[in-house]
Amino acid sequence: MNGTNGIHGIDVAVITRRNRATNDPRLAFYAHWLNDMGFVIGALAQFLPEEYGMTFTLYNENIPKYSELLRTTREKGGTLIHVCRHNHREDPHLCIIGKYLEQTGLKYGDTMLMRYEYGSIRMRKLPNDMIRVVTSHLSGKWLAELGFTPDEVLTVAAEPGMITCKLQENGQDRAAELVKYARQNKLQLIQVRPPSNNIDLPPSYLEKAGVLPTDALLATCEYGFIQLQKLDFVALGF
């Protein structure tokens, strides 16, 4: 594997399907950061399945004998692939389908958390479909699906390691009631800002939770409710 250049990060991907008739799982994703991690178009990568996850490892021209690498990879249930270009997209493309994904236990619709560094990508399934990875600035259409639309009121609570947001329906009409409720329970009242359902968490509550504005957070969601926690990679199986 090539040497590291110190860059690393996280991303998410969703397991799709080859066709509607069988729902056979398929992983296919494009990302510009693949170039920075060495997974350029044409590069050789080793895919190895894991329980509810997988790893991709980059190999360059200094690999051991190809046939030996292929043999040991297959013994582990994996395969060798080349990073490719799909249609007219400029970003590199990684794709795995069929029997190789069947060994992971993953299914159509599963959301994967990716943790990457130079020459290596590891993916693990997030616990349920209502979990996503965010920062302290929340925005997007997904918030509207949970009821957090522009000008709606929510309460924010914080404790070490956790921030909780709760929608307060008809909040503007209940202003006096909610102000009193927030003071009694040490909560912060904020409004969703237009145009893209923006929610900026109060800095003092980030500090109380031990969270930095740039930290990646795991958001557990249901209608009118968002709970944010710092990513625990060990708990997620990394």
Image (cartoon, rainbow, N blue to C red):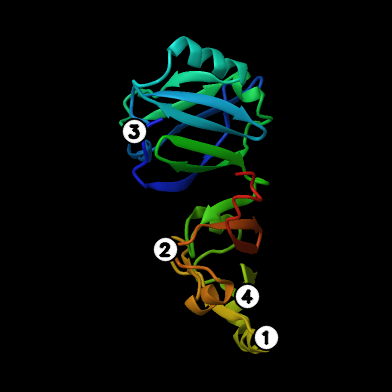
Residue drawn at (64%, 57%), measured in percent from left and top?
221
Q: In front: mark 2 or mark 4?
A: 4
**Which of the two discs, 2 and 4, labels the residue nearer the N terminus?**
4
Amino acid type indicated by mark 4? Ala
Q: Quadrant of residue 176?
A: bottom right
Q: Which residue is mark 2?
A: 195
Amino acid type indicated by mark 3? Asp
Amino acid type indicated by mark 1? Tyr
Determine crowd level at label 3: few under 14, some 14-19, many 20+ residues with C-alpha closer than 10 A: some
**Which of the two discs, 3 and 2, labels the residue nearer the N terminus?**
3
Distance between the alpha carbons at the discs numbered 2 and 4 = 24 Å
Which mark, residue 157? Answer: 4
> Which one is in front, 70 or 23?
70
Which mark, residue 91? Answer: 3
Query: Where the N terminus falls, by quadrant?
Result: top left
Residue 143 coordinates in the image, percent (x, y): 55, 58
Q: Residue furthest top?
A: 67
**Which of the two discs, 4 and 3, labels the residue nearer the N terminus?**
3
Q: Above or below — where is 94 with respect to 154?
A: above
Q: Which residue is mark 1?
A: 181
Amino acid type indicated by mark 2? Pro
Distance between the alpha carbons at the discs numbered 4 and 3 = 40 Å
